[in-house]
Image (cartoon, grey):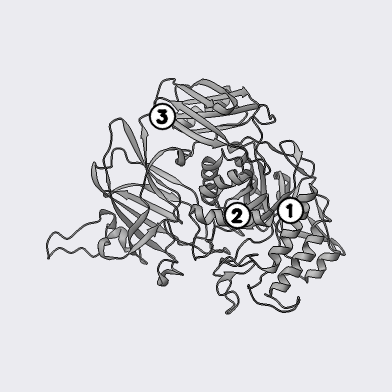
Amino acid sequence: MRKIIAASIAILFFRPAFAEPPAAHLMANLAGRTTISLDGTWNAIVDPYETGLGSRFYENAKAKSPSDLVEYNFDTSGTLQVPGDWNTQREPLLFYEGPLWYQRYFSYHGRPHTRVFLYFGAANYEARVWLNGKKLGEHVGGFTPFDFEVTGEIADGDNSVVVEVNNTRHADGVPTLNSDWWNYGGLTRSVDLVVLPEAFLEDYSVQLAKGSTEEIAGWVRLEGRSQPQTVALDIPEITLKKTLTTDATGYAAFRFPAKPRLWSPDDPKLYRVVLTAAGDTVEDQIGFRSITTRGRQILLNGKPIFLRGIAMHEEAPFRDGRAFSEQDDRVLLGWAKELGCNFVRLAHYPHNETVIRLADQLGLLVWEEVPVYWNIAWDNPSTLENAEQQLRDAVARDHNRASIVLWSLSNETPPSPSRLEFLKAMAAYARTLDDTRLITSAMNHVDKTGEGTRSLSDPLGQYLDVLGLNEYLGWYEGRPEDADHTEWKTAYEKPLIISEFGGGAVYGYHGDVNTRFTEEYQANLFEHQLKMVERIPSLAGMSPWVLMDFRSPRRMLAGVQDFHNRKGLISNRGQRKQAFYVLQKFYLGMAGRE
Protein backbone atom coordinates (compact mmCIF):
# COMPACT_ATOMS: atom_id res chain seq x y z
CA MET A 1 0.00 0.00 0.00
CA ARG A 2 2.89 2.36 0.82
CA LYS A 3 4.23 2.02 -2.73
CA ILE A 4 0.83 2.53 -4.35
CA ILE A 5 0.27 5.75 -2.39
CA ALA A 6 3.77 6.92 -3.27
CA ALA A 7 3.23 6.33 -6.97
CA SER A 8 -0.07 8.19 -6.84
CA ILE A 9 1.50 11.21 -5.14
CA ALA A 10 4.34 11.24 -7.67
CA ILE A 11 1.90 11.23 -10.57
CA LEU A 12 -0.19 14.02 -9.04
CA PHE A 13 2.73 16.38 -8.43
CA PHE A 14 5.30 15.40 -11.06
CA ARG A 15 5.16 13.11 -14.05
CA PRO A 16 8.68 12.31 -15.31
CA ALA A 17 9.36 11.76 -19.00
CA PHE A 18 9.75 8.08 -18.24
CA ALA A 19 6.90 7.38 -15.82
CA GLU A 20 7.37 5.05 -12.89
CA PRO A 21 5.49 1.81 -13.60
CA PRO A 22 3.09 0.45 -11.02
CA ALA A 23 5.21 -1.44 -8.50
CA ALA A 24 5.73 -5.06 -9.49
CA HIS A 25 7.40 -5.82 -6.13
CA LEU A 26 10.34 -7.20 -8.06
CA MET A 27 13.95 -6.14 -7.70
CA ALA A 28 15.58 -4.94 -10.90
CA ASN A 29 18.85 -6.22 -12.34
CA LEU A 30 19.49 -9.53 -10.63
CA ALA A 31 22.89 -9.68 -12.37
CA GLY A 32 23.96 -6.58 -10.43
CA ARG A 33 23.19 -8.11 -7.01
CA THR A 34 24.96 -10.40 -4.57
CA THR A 35 23.43 -13.82 -5.23
CA ILE A 36 23.83 -17.42 -4.11
CA SER A 37 22.77 -19.87 -6.81
CA LEU A 38 20.38 -22.68 -5.90
CA ASP A 39 20.66 -24.17 -9.38
CA GLY A 40 21.63 -27.81 -9.71
CA THR A 41 20.09 -31.06 -8.53
CA TRP A 42 16.73 -30.89 -6.76
CA ASN A 43 14.69 -33.77 -5.39
CA ALA A 44 11.37 -34.21 -7.19
CA ILE A 45 8.06 -36.03 -6.62
CA VAL A 46 5.47 -36.36 -9.39
CA ASP A 47 2.01 -35.83 -7.91
CA PRO A 48 -0.74 -36.32 -10.55
CA TYR A 49 -3.61 -36.26 -7.99
CA GLU A 50 -2.11 -33.35 -5.99
CA THR A 51 -1.90 -35.51 -2.91
CA GLY A 52 1.02 -33.46 -1.66
CA LEU A 53 -1.03 -30.56 -0.33
CA GLY A 54 -3.14 -32.75 1.94
CA SER A 55 -0.12 -34.85 2.89
CA ARG A 56 1.88 -31.68 3.65
CA PHE A 57 4.83 -32.43 1.41
CA TYR A 58 6.04 -28.89 2.13
CA GLU A 59 7.04 -29.98 5.64
CA ASN A 60 9.56 -32.46 4.20
CA ALA A 61 8.79 -34.71 7.16
CA LYS A 62 10.93 -37.74 8.11
CA ALA A 63 9.82 -40.84 9.96
CA LYS A 64 11.30 -40.72 13.43
CA SER A 65 10.66 -44.39 14.15
CA PRO A 66 9.79 -47.52 12.14
CA SER A 67 6.15 -47.18 13.19
CA ASP A 68 5.73 -43.62 11.87
CA LEU A 69 3.59 -43.27 8.73
CA VAL A 70 5.06 -40.80 6.24
CA GLU A 71 3.95 -41.63 2.68
CA TYR A 72 6.50 -39.59 0.77
CA ASN A 73 10.24 -39.15 0.80
CA PHE A 74 11.98 -36.49 -1.26
CA ASP A 75 15.37 -38.06 -0.63
CA THR A 76 14.47 -41.30 -2.45
CA SER A 77 12.10 -39.99 -5.15
CA GLY A 78 14.56 -39.12 -7.89
CA THR A 79 15.95 -35.79 -9.00
CA LEU A 80 15.61 -33.10 -11.65
CA GLN A 81 18.04 -30.43 -12.78
CA VAL A 82 17.16 -26.78 -12.17
CA PRO A 83 16.89 -24.78 -14.34
CA GLY A 84 15.16 -27.17 -16.69
CA ASP A 85 11.81 -28.55 -17.72
CA TRP A 86 10.69 -31.93 -16.41
CA ASN A 87 9.31 -33.07 -19.78
CA THR A 88 12.69 -33.76 -21.36
CA GLN A 89 14.50 -34.95 -18.22
CA ARG A 90 12.35 -38.02 -17.59
CA GLU A 91 10.88 -39.84 -20.58
CA PRO A 92 7.55 -40.71 -18.85
CA LEU A 93 7.00 -36.99 -18.21
CA LEU A 94 7.18 -35.87 -21.87
CA PHE A 95 3.43 -35.14 -22.01
CA TYR A 96 2.87 -34.74 -18.26
CA GLU A 97 0.73 -31.84 -17.14
CA GLY A 98 -0.03 -31.47 -13.47
CA PRO A 99 1.60 -30.91 -10.08
CA LEU A 100 5.20 -31.79 -9.36
CA TRP A 101 7.07 -31.07 -6.13
CA TYR A 102 10.67 -29.85 -5.97
CA GLN A 103 12.81 -29.87 -2.83
CA ARG A 104 16.36 -28.76 -2.12
CA TYR A 105 18.56 -28.45 0.96
CA PHE A 106 20.98 -25.55 1.23
CA SER A 107 23.14 -23.89 3.84
CA TYR A 108 23.12 -20.21 4.59
CA HIS A 109 25.14 -18.18 7.06
CA GLY A 110 23.85 -14.67 7.32
CA ARG A 111 25.45 -11.36 8.04
CA PRO A 112 23.95 -8.66 10.27
CA HIS A 113 22.01 -5.78 8.73
CA THR A 114 21.13 -7.68 5.56
CA ARG A 115 17.93 -8.86 3.92
CA VAL A 116 17.51 -12.06 1.94
CA PHE A 117 15.15 -12.81 -0.95
CA LEU A 118 14.38 -16.05 -2.78
CA TYR A 119 14.24 -15.24 -6.49
CA PHE A 120 12.79 -17.46 -9.25
CA GLY A 121 13.53 -16.67 -12.90
CA ALA A 122 10.33 -18.50 -13.89
CA ALA A 123 8.19 -21.49 -12.97
CA ASN A 124 5.59 -22.82 -15.40
CA TYR A 125 2.75 -22.28 -14.67
CA GLU A 126 1.60 -21.95 -11.05
CA ALA A 127 4.04 -22.14 -8.17
CA ARG A 128 3.63 -22.41 -4.40
CA VAL A 129 6.76 -21.95 -2.31
CA TRP A 130 7.66 -22.99 1.24
CA LEU A 131 10.84 -22.44 3.24
CA ASN A 132 11.46 -24.69 6.24
CA GLY A 133 7.78 -25.64 6.21
CA LYS A 134 6.41 -22.08 6.15
CA LYS A 135 4.56 -20.89 3.07
CA LEU A 136 6.15 -17.88 1.40
CA GLY A 137 3.56 -17.30 -1.30
CA GLU A 138 2.30 -18.17 -4.76
CA HIS A 139 2.86 -17.01 -8.32
CA VAL A 140 0.83 -17.46 -11.52
CA GLY A 141 2.39 -17.13 -14.98
CA GLY A 142 5.00 -19.31 -16.58
CA PHE A 143 7.51 -16.85 -18.05
CA THR A 144 8.15 -13.99 -15.64
CA PRO A 145 10.26 -13.77 -12.47
CA PHE A 146 9.05 -13.50 -8.89
CA ASP A 147 10.63 -13.28 -5.48
CA PHE A 148 9.83 -13.58 -1.76
CA GLU A 149 11.60 -11.99 1.16
CA VAL A 150 12.88 -14.68 3.54
CA THR A 151 14.85 -12.51 5.97
CA GLY A 152 12.84 -13.62 8.98
CA GLU A 153 12.41 -17.22 7.86
CA ILE A 154 15.80 -18.38 6.66
CA ALA A 155 17.82 -20.32 9.24
CA ASP A 156 21.48 -19.72 9.99
CA GLY A 157 22.71 -23.10 8.81
CA ASP A 158 20.66 -25.79 7.09
CA ASN A 159 17.45 -24.99 5.22
CA SER A 160 14.93 -26.77 3.03
CA VAL A 161 12.97 -25.10 0.22
CA VAL A 162 9.95 -26.86 -1.32
CA VAL A 163 8.18 -25.70 -4.47
CA GLU A 164 5.03 -27.17 -5.97
CA VAL A 165 4.89 -26.36 -9.70
CA ASN A 166 1.73 -27.12 -11.67
CA ASN A 167 1.59 -26.66 -15.46
CA THR A 168 -2.07 -27.66 -15.84
CA ARG A 169 -3.75 -25.61 -18.57
CA HIS A 170 -6.88 -23.62 -17.67
CA ALA A 171 -9.70 -22.16 -19.74
CA ASP A 172 -9.29 -18.82 -17.95
CA GLY A 173 -5.47 -18.91 -18.02
CA VAL A 174 -2.94 -16.90 -20.02
CA PRO A 175 -2.19 -18.76 -22.24
CA THR A 176 -5.41 -20.74 -22.26
CA LEU A 177 -6.08 -24.40 -23.11
CA ASN A 178 -4.78 -24.27 -26.68
CA SER A 179 -1.38 -23.17 -27.91
CA ASP A 180 1.11 -24.27 -30.56
CA TRP A 181 4.17 -24.79 -28.38
CA TRP A 182 5.16 -27.34 -25.76
CA ASN A 183 3.80 -26.82 -22.27
CA TYR A 184 7.14 -27.32 -20.55
CA GLY A 185 6.63 -27.67 -16.80
CA GLY A 186 8.97 -26.98 -13.94
CA LEU A 187 11.51 -24.53 -12.59
CA THR A 188 12.58 -23.59 -16.09
CA ARG A 189 14.90 -20.72 -15.11
CA SER A 190 17.44 -20.17 -12.36
CA VAL A 191 16.70 -19.96 -8.64
CA ASP A 192 18.82 -17.67 -6.45
CA LEU A 193 19.13 -16.31 -2.96
CA VAL A 194 19.68 -12.56 -3.16
CA VAL A 195 21.48 -10.86 -0.27
CA LEU A 196 20.84 -7.12 0.08
CA PRO A 197 21.45 -4.32 2.58
CA GLU A 198 18.60 -3.35 4.91
CA ALA A 199 17.86 -0.47 2.54
CA PHE A 200 18.41 -1.17 -1.15
CA LEU A 201 17.69 0.14 -4.62
CA GLU A 202 14.70 -1.96 -5.57
CA ASP A 203 14.15 -0.60 -9.07
CA TYR A 204 15.17 2.23 -11.36
CA SER A 205 14.79 3.54 -14.87
CA VAL A 206 17.62 5.28 -16.73
CA GLN A 207 16.62 6.07 -20.33
CA LEU A 208 16.53 8.85 -22.89
CA ALA A 209 13.78 11.31 -22.10
CA LYS A 210 10.77 10.80 -24.31
CA GLY A 211 11.05 12.97 -27.40
CA SER A 212 14.70 13.85 -26.84
CA THR A 213 18.10 12.38 -27.68
CA GLU A 214 19.92 14.93 -25.53
CA GLU A 215 18.39 14.30 -22.13
CA ILE A 216 18.40 11.33 -19.79
CA ALA A 217 15.35 10.85 -17.60
CA GLY A 218 13.98 8.29 -15.21
CA TRP A 219 13.38 7.44 -11.60
CA VAL A 220 14.70 5.37 -8.69
CA ARG A 221 12.83 3.49 -5.99
CA LEU A 222 14.60 2.82 -2.70
CA GLU A 223 13.21 0.14 -0.39
CA GLY A 224 13.75 0.09 3.38
CA ARG A 225 13.88 3.74 4.44
CA SER A 226 11.00 5.93 5.62
CA GLN A 227 12.91 9.23 5.45
CA PRO A 228 14.30 11.08 2.41
CA GLN A 229 17.59 9.61 1.22
CA THR A 230 20.37 10.65 -1.14
CA VAL A 231 20.95 8.61 -4.30
CA ALA A 232 24.02 9.07 -6.49
CA LEU A 233 23.72 8.45 -10.24
CA ASP A 234 26.99 8.10 -12.14
CA ILE A 235 27.62 7.42 -15.85
CA PRO A 236 31.44 7.77 -15.87
CA GLU A 237 32.02 7.63 -19.63
CA ILE A 238 29.98 10.77 -20.27
CA THR A 239 31.04 12.35 -16.95
CA LEU A 240 27.46 12.53 -15.76
CA LYS A 241 27.27 12.55 -11.99
CA LYS A 242 24.09 13.61 -10.25
CA THR A 243 22.65 13.50 -6.75
CA LEU A 244 18.97 12.74 -6.23
CA THR A 245 16.88 12.99 -3.09
CA THR A 246 14.04 10.55 -2.56
CA ASP A 247 10.78 11.43 -0.93
CA ALA A 248 9.69 9.71 2.28
CA THR A 249 8.46 6.73 0.27
CA GLY A 250 11.84 6.15 -1.39
CA TYR A 251 10.94 7.53 -4.84
CA ALA A 252 12.82 10.15 -6.85
CA ALA A 253 12.46 11.25 -10.47
CA PHE A 254 15.07 13.03 -12.57
CA ARG A 255 15.80 14.59 -15.94
CA PHE A 256 19.26 15.85 -16.97
CA PRO A 257 20.91 17.15 -20.14
CA ALA A 258 23.24 14.57 -21.68
CA LYS A 259 24.56 13.57 -25.09
CA PRO A 260 25.30 9.85 -25.04
CA ARG A 261 26.31 7.96 -28.17
CA LEU A 262 23.08 6.44 -29.35
CA TRP A 263 22.56 2.68 -29.31
CA SER A 264 21.67 1.05 -32.65
CA PRO A 265 22.12 -2.32 -34.39
CA ASP A 266 25.17 -0.90 -36.17
CA ASP A 267 26.60 0.53 -32.95
CA PRO A 268 25.17 -1.21 -29.86
CA LYS A 269 26.86 1.12 -27.41
CA LEU A 270 26.26 0.34 -23.73
CA TYR A 271 27.24 2.60 -20.85
CA ARG A 272 28.21 1.60 -17.33
CA VAL A 273 25.60 3.11 -15.02
CA VAL A 274 26.18 3.14 -11.26
CA LEU A 275 23.51 3.91 -8.65
CA THR A 276 24.43 4.24 -4.97
CA ALA A 277 22.18 4.84 -1.96
CA ALA A 278 22.04 3.96 1.74
CA GLY A 279 24.98 1.56 1.48
CA ASP A 280 23.71 -0.22 -1.63
CA THR A 281 25.41 0.00 -5.04
CA VAL A 282 23.95 -1.38 -8.27
CA GLU A 283 25.73 -1.37 -11.63
CA ASP A 284 24.10 -1.89 -15.00
CA GLN A 285 24.98 -1.72 -18.69
CA ILE A 286 22.45 0.52 -20.42
CA GLY A 287 22.08 1.74 -23.99
CA PHE A 288 20.34 4.97 -24.94
CA ARG A 289 18.13 5.16 -28.03
CA SER A 290 14.75 6.50 -29.09
CA ILE A 291 12.04 4.56 -30.91
CA THR A 292 9.09 6.37 -32.50
CA THR A 293 6.87 6.27 -35.58
CA ARG A 294 6.11 8.74 -38.34
CA GLY A 295 3.25 7.79 -40.60
CA ARG A 296 4.11 4.33 -41.88
CA GLN A 297 7.73 4.43 -40.78
CA ILE A 298 9.47 3.22 -37.64
CA LEU A 299 12.17 5.66 -36.54
CA LEU A 300 15.22 4.61 -34.53
CA ASN A 301 17.01 7.65 -33.14
CA GLY A 302 14.93 9.79 -35.46
CA LYS A 303 15.83 7.90 -38.66
CA PRO A 304 13.74 5.35 -40.60
CA ILE A 305 14.74 1.73 -40.07
CA PHE A 306 13.53 -1.49 -41.66
CA LEU A 307 13.30 -4.35 -39.18
CA ARG A 308 15.00 -7.36 -40.80
CA GLY A 309 13.82 -10.01 -38.40
CA ILE A 310 13.03 -13.57 -37.53
CA ALA A 311 10.61 -15.04 -35.00
CA MET A 312 11.91 -17.51 -32.45
CA HIS A 313 10.72 -19.71 -29.61
CA GLU A 314 12.63 -20.28 -26.38
CA GLU A 315 13.61 -23.79 -27.47
CA ALA A 316 17.08 -25.18 -26.90
CA PRO A 317 19.31 -25.83 -29.92
CA PHE A 318 21.08 -29.21 -30.22
CA ARG A 319 19.10 -30.74 -27.34
CA ASP A 320 15.46 -31.06 -26.36
CA GLY A 321 13.68 -28.76 -23.96
CA ARG A 322 13.33 -25.16 -22.89
CA ALA A 323 16.32 -22.91 -23.59
CA PHE A 324 17.69 -21.31 -20.43
CA SER A 325 21.47 -20.91 -20.62
CA GLU A 326 23.63 -18.15 -22.03
CA GLN A 327 25.12 -20.76 -24.36
CA ASP A 328 21.63 -21.54 -25.73
CA ASP A 329 20.91 -17.87 -26.25
CA ARG A 330 24.22 -17.11 -27.93
CA VAL A 331 23.59 -19.87 -30.45
CA LEU A 332 20.05 -18.73 -31.24
CA LEU A 333 20.90 -15.04 -31.55
CA GLY A 334 24.08 -15.93 -33.43
CA TRP A 335 21.95 -17.66 -36.05
CA ALA A 336 19.74 -14.56 -36.29
CA LYS A 337 22.83 -12.41 -36.88
CA GLU A 338 24.07 -14.90 -39.49
CA LEU A 339 20.74 -14.49 -41.30
CA GLY A 340 21.39 -10.77 -41.55
CA CYS A 341 18.81 -9.79 -38.93
CA ASN A 342 18.74 -6.60 -36.93
CA PHE A 343 15.52 -7.67 -35.19
CA VAL A 344 14.01 -10.70 -33.42
CA ARG A 345 10.44 -11.40 -32.43
CA LEU A 346 10.50 -13.36 -29.17
CA ALA A 347 7.28 -15.37 -29.48
CA HIS A 348 4.86 -15.93 -27.73
CA TYR A 349 5.83 -15.12 -24.15
CA PRO A 350 8.66 -13.33 -22.32
CA HIS A 351 11.93 -15.19 -22.90
CA ASN A 352 14.65 -15.33 -20.25
CA GLU A 353 16.51 -12.20 -19.20
CA THR A 354 19.85 -13.34 -20.59
CA VAL A 355 18.58 -13.34 -24.17
CA ILE A 356 17.44 -9.72 -23.78
CA ARG A 357 20.81 -8.63 -22.38
CA LEU A 358 22.61 -10.43 -25.20
CA ALA A 359 20.39 -8.63 -27.71
CA ASP A 360 21.55 -5.38 -26.08
CA GLN A 361 25.16 -6.42 -26.65
CA LEU A 362 24.69 -7.77 -30.18
CA GLY A 363 22.57 -4.93 -31.51
CA LEU A 364 19.33 -6.81 -32.11
CA LEU A 365 16.02 -4.98 -31.74
CA VAL A 366 13.43 -7.02 -29.82
CA TRP A 367 9.68 -7.61 -29.94
CA GLU A 368 8.64 -8.96 -26.51
CA GLU A 369 5.23 -10.58 -26.13
CA VAL A 370 2.87 -11.81 -23.44
CA PRO A 371 1.01 -15.11 -24.00
CA VAL A 372 -2.43 -13.74 -24.86
CA TYR A 373 -2.75 -16.32 -27.59
CA TRP A 374 -5.66 -17.30 -29.82
CA ASN A 375 -9.07 -17.26 -28.11
CA ILE A 376 -8.99 -16.72 -24.35
CA ALA A 377 -11.60 -15.84 -21.70
CA TRP A 378 -12.12 -12.25 -22.83
CA ASP A 379 -15.06 -11.61 -20.48
CA ASN A 380 -13.31 -12.88 -17.34
CA PRO A 381 -11.86 -10.02 -15.22
CA SER A 382 -9.35 -12.38 -13.58
CA THR A 383 -8.00 -13.34 -17.01
CA LEU A 384 -7.39 -9.68 -17.83
CA GLU A 385 -5.75 -9.22 -14.43
CA ASN A 386 -3.50 -12.22 -15.14
CA ALA A 387 -2.52 -10.85 -18.58
CA GLU A 388 -1.77 -7.43 -17.13
CA GLN A 389 0.28 -8.96 -14.32
CA GLN A 390 2.44 -10.85 -16.82
CA LEU A 391 2.89 -7.67 -18.86
CA ARG A 392 3.77 -5.71 -15.72
CA ASP A 393 6.34 -8.31 -14.64
CA ALA A 394 7.95 -8.34 -18.10
CA VAL A 395 8.22 -4.55 -18.13
CA ALA A 396 9.57 -4.52 -14.57
CA ARG A 397 12.34 -6.93 -15.56
CA ASP A 398 13.30 -5.45 -18.93
CA HIS A 399 12.44 -1.75 -19.00
CA ASN A 400 16.11 -0.68 -18.99
CA ARG A 401 17.05 -2.78 -22.02
CA ALA A 402 17.72 -0.71 -25.13
CA SER A 403 17.02 -3.65 -27.45
CA ILE A 404 13.33 -3.85 -26.58
CA VAL A 405 11.39 -1.56 -28.90
CA LEU A 406 8.01 -3.32 -29.08
CA TRP A 407 5.70 -4.64 -26.38
CA SER A 408 3.27 -7.09 -28.00
CA LEU A 409 -0.12 -7.61 -26.37
CA SER A 410 -1.31 -10.71 -28.21
CA ASN A 411 -1.08 -13.16 -31.10
CA GLU A 412 -3.78 -14.18 -33.59
CA THR A 413 -6.78 -13.31 -31.44
CA PRO A 414 -10.17 -13.59 -33.23
CA PRO A 415 -12.05 -10.27 -33.41
CA SER A 416 -15.06 -9.79 -31.15
CA PRO A 417 -16.37 -6.90 -29.04
CA SER A 418 -15.14 -8.46 -25.79
CA ARG A 419 -11.71 -9.20 -27.26
CA LEU A 420 -11.43 -5.60 -28.45
CA GLU A 421 -12.28 -4.22 -24.99
CA PHE A 422 -9.79 -6.62 -23.37
CA LEU A 423 -6.90 -5.64 -25.63
CA LYS A 424 -7.88 -1.95 -25.59
CA ALA A 425 -7.52 -2.10 -21.79
CA MET A 426 -4.17 -3.86 -22.12
CA ALA A 427 -2.88 -1.25 -24.57
CA ALA A 428 -3.83 1.56 -22.20
CA TYR A 429 -2.22 -0.29 -19.29
CA ALA A 430 0.96 -0.92 -21.30
CA ARG A 431 1.32 2.82 -21.88
CA THR A 432 1.07 3.52 -18.15
CA LEU A 433 3.88 1.01 -17.62
CA ASP A 434 6.14 2.36 -20.37
CA ASP A 435 5.33 5.27 -22.64
CA THR A 436 8.69 5.25 -24.45
CA ARG A 437 8.25 2.07 -26.47
CA LEU A 438 5.84 1.03 -29.22
CA ILE A 439 2.78 -1.15 -28.71
CA THR A 440 1.88 -3.88 -31.20
CA SER A 441 -0.03 -7.14 -31.64
CA ALA A 442 0.20 -9.92 -34.20
CA MET A 443 -3.14 -9.99 -36.04
CA ASN A 444 -4.43 -12.35 -38.72
CA HIS A 445 -7.99 -11.17 -39.49
CA VAL A 446 -7.85 -10.09 -43.13
CA ASP A 447 -10.53 -8.86 -45.53
CA LYS A 448 -10.45 -9.74 -49.23
CA THR A 449 -11.34 -6.38 -50.75
CA GLY A 450 -10.99 -7.31 -54.40
CA GLU A 451 -9.38 -9.73 -56.81
CA GLY A 452 -5.92 -10.32 -55.40
CA THR A 453 -6.24 -7.54 -52.81
CA ARG A 454 -6.23 -8.12 -49.07
CA SER A 455 -6.67 -5.61 -46.28
CA LEU A 456 -5.71 -5.69 -42.63
CA SER A 457 -8.63 -3.85 -41.06
CA ASP A 458 -8.77 -5.39 -37.58
CA PRO A 459 -10.29 -2.75 -35.26
CA LEU A 460 -7.55 -3.49 -32.74
CA GLY A 461 -5.23 -1.57 -35.06
CA GLN A 462 -6.59 1.77 -33.86
CA TYR A 463 -5.07 1.17 -30.40
CA LEU A 464 -1.63 0.09 -31.61
CA ASP A 465 1.46 2.02 -32.66
CA VAL A 466 2.65 -0.69 -35.05
CA LEU A 467 0.53 -3.29 -36.87
CA GLY A 468 1.60 -6.91 -36.83
CA LEU A 469 0.29 -9.26 -39.54
CA ASN A 470 0.53 -13.05 -39.57
CA GLU A 471 -0.25 -14.44 -43.03
CA TYR A 472 0.37 -17.93 -44.41
CA LEU A 473 -0.35 -17.57 -48.11
CA GLY A 474 1.14 -20.64 -49.77
CA TRP A 475 0.87 -22.87 -46.70
CA TYR A 476 -2.55 -22.73 -45.01
CA GLU A 477 -4.13 -20.97 -47.96
CA GLY A 478 -3.46 -21.17 -51.69
CA ARG A 479 -0.14 -21.88 -53.35
CA PRO A 480 3.18 -20.04 -53.00
CA GLU A 481 2.75 -18.57 -56.49
CA ASP A 482 -0.46 -16.80 -55.40
CA ALA A 483 1.77 -14.24 -53.69
CA ASP A 484 2.86 -12.97 -57.12
CA HIS A 485 -0.51 -11.31 -57.73
CA THR A 486 -1.53 -10.44 -54.16
CA GLU A 487 -1.48 -6.84 -52.96
CA TRP A 488 -1.78 -5.78 -49.32
CA LYS A 489 -3.41 -2.73 -47.81
CA THR A 490 -4.06 -1.60 -44.24
CA ALA A 491 -6.87 0.47 -42.80
CA TYR A 492 -4.45 2.55 -40.72
CA GLU A 493 -1.70 5.03 -41.54
CA LYS A 494 0.71 3.11 -39.32
CA PRO A 495 3.84 0.99 -39.80
CA LEU A 496 3.25 -2.66 -40.69
CA ILE A 497 5.38 -5.64 -39.70
CA ILE A 498 4.72 -8.99 -41.35
CA SER A 499 5.12 -10.79 -38.03
CA GLU A 500 4.73 -14.30 -39.49
CA PHE A 501 4.84 -16.11 -42.82
CA GLY A 502 6.34 -19.44 -43.72
CA GLY A 503 5.84 -23.14 -44.28
CA GLY A 504 7.10 -26.46 -42.97
CA ALA A 505 10.07 -28.49 -44.18
CA VAL A 506 11.99 -31.45 -42.83
CA TYR A 507 15.73 -30.96 -43.10
CA GLY A 508 17.14 -33.37 -45.69
CA TYR A 509 13.76 -34.19 -47.25
CA HIS A 510 13.94 -33.24 -50.93
CA GLY A 511 11.55 -33.19 -53.85
CA ASP A 512 10.01 -30.74 -56.28
CA VAL A 513 8.63 -27.35 -55.28
CA ASN A 514 5.07 -28.72 -55.15
CA THR A 515 5.77 -31.41 -52.55
CA ARG A 516 4.86 -30.38 -49.03
CA PHE A 517 7.46 -30.54 -46.27
CA THR A 518 10.38 -30.65 -48.70
CA GLU A 519 13.12 -28.08 -48.40
CA GLU A 520 12.33 -27.08 -51.98
CA TYR A 521 8.68 -26.26 -51.16
CA GLN A 522 9.71 -24.08 -48.21
CA ALA A 523 12.43 -22.29 -50.20
CA ASN A 524 10.05 -21.65 -53.10
CA LEU A 525 7.45 -20.26 -50.71
CA PHE A 526 10.03 -17.83 -49.30
CA GLU A 527 11.06 -16.74 -52.79
CA HIS A 528 7.49 -15.75 -53.68
CA GLN A 529 6.74 -14.21 -50.29
CA LEU A 530 9.79 -11.96 -50.40
CA LYS A 531 8.82 -10.63 -53.82
CA MET A 532 5.32 -9.92 -52.48
CA VAL A 533 6.36 -8.11 -49.31
CA GLU A 534 8.67 -5.80 -51.26
CA ARG A 535 5.53 -4.38 -52.90
CA ILE A 536 3.85 -3.40 -49.60
CA PRO A 537 4.24 0.39 -49.26
CA SER A 538 3.63 0.50 -45.50
CA LEU A 539 6.02 -2.33 -44.69
CA ALA A 540 8.41 -1.40 -41.88
CA GLY A 541 9.72 -4.85 -41.02
CA MET A 542 9.20 -8.60 -40.97
CA SER A 543 9.87 -11.61 -38.79
CA PRO A 544 9.17 -14.79 -40.77
CA TRP A 545 8.18 -17.95 -38.95
CA VAL A 546 10.47 -19.34 -37.54
CA LEU A 547 14.20 -19.50 -36.72
CA MET A 548 14.35 -23.13 -35.54
CA ASP A 549 12.04 -26.16 -35.41
CA PHE A 550 10.33 -26.51 -32.04
CA ARG A 551 8.16 -29.01 -30.21
CA SER A 552 4.38 -28.77 -30.43
CA PRO A 553 1.78 -31.35 -29.33
CA ARG A 554 -0.48 -30.16 -32.16
CA ARG A 555 1.94 -31.38 -34.84
CA MET A 556 1.40 -35.15 -34.98
CA LEU A 557 2.22 -36.24 -38.56
CA ALA A 558 4.34 -39.33 -38.02
CA GLY A 559 7.66 -39.42 -39.82
CA VAL A 560 7.43 -35.73 -40.67
CA GLN A 561 6.41 -33.61 -37.71
CA ASP A 562 6.66 -36.12 -34.85
CA PHE A 563 5.32 -33.48 -32.43
CA HIS A 564 7.48 -30.70 -33.90
CA ASN A 565 6.52 -27.58 -35.78
CA ARG A 566 8.84 -27.90 -38.81
CA LYS A 567 8.60 -24.31 -40.05
CA GLY A 568 12.10 -23.57 -38.79
CA LEU A 569 14.73 -22.32 -41.22
CA ILE A 570 17.10 -24.38 -39.09
CA SER A 571 16.42 -27.85 -37.68
CA ASN A 572 16.50 -28.33 -33.93
CA ARG A 573 19.91 -29.93 -34.46
CA GLY A 574 21.33 -26.83 -36.12
CA GLN A 575 21.04 -27.89 -39.78
CA ARG A 576 20.24 -25.01 -42.14
CA LYS A 577 17.48 -25.60 -44.68
CA GLN A 578 17.42 -24.09 -48.17
CA ALA A 579 15.02 -21.33 -47.12
CA PHE A 580 17.61 -20.08 -44.60
CA TYR A 581 19.86 -19.07 -47.47
CA VAL A 582 16.97 -17.53 -49.43
CA LEU A 583 16.15 -15.20 -46.54
CA GLN A 584 19.82 -14.56 -45.79
CA LYS A 585 20.45 -13.42 -49.37
CA PHE A 586 17.44 -11.11 -49.21
CA TYR A 587 18.48 -9.55 -45.90
CA LEU A 588 22.13 -9.12 -46.77
CA GLY A 589 21.13 -7.48 -50.05
CA MET A 590 18.74 -5.17 -48.20
CA ALA A 591 21.40 -4.28 -45.62
CA GLY A 592 23.80 -3.45 -48.42
CA ARG A 593 21.33 -0.92 -49.85
CA GLU A 594 20.72 0.86 -46.55
Residue 89 in sight in this render: yes
Mark 1 or mark 2, whichever is nearer to me: 2
What SS does tag 3 mark?
Answer: strand
The answer to whether 11 appears left or right of 158 in the picture is right
Residue at horizontal 27 percent and vertical 61 percent from the top: 74
Measured Cα–Cα span from mark 3 to mark 1 = 49 Å
Q: Position of residue 447 (x, y in %)?
A: 79, 59
Q: Residue furthest right?
A: 451
Determine whether 574 is above or below 172 in the image.
below
Q: Position of residue 404 (x, y in %)?
A: 61, 44
Q: Residues within 10 Å of mark 2 (few under 14, many from 20)?
A: some
Measured Cα–Cα span from mark 1 to mark 2 = 35 Å
* Contact? badges 2 and 3 (CB < 8 Å): no
On residue 46, the disc is none
Mark 1 lies on residue: 458
Amino acid at circle 2:
Gly
Image quarter (top left, top right, bottom left or bottom right) of the N terminus: top left
On residue 280, the disc is 3
Mark 3 or mark 1, whichever is nearer to me: 3
Mark 2 or mark 3, whichever is nearer to me: 2
The answer to whether 532 appears left or right of 18 in the picture is right
The answer to whether 257 appears left or right of 141 in the picture is right
N-term mark: 3 or 1: 3
Q: Residue 242 appears in which quarter of the rendering?
A: top right
Mark 2 lies on residue: 334
The answer to whether 531 appears left or right of 153 in the picture is right
Amino acid at circle 3:
Asp
* Contact? badges 1 and 2 (CB < 8 Å): no
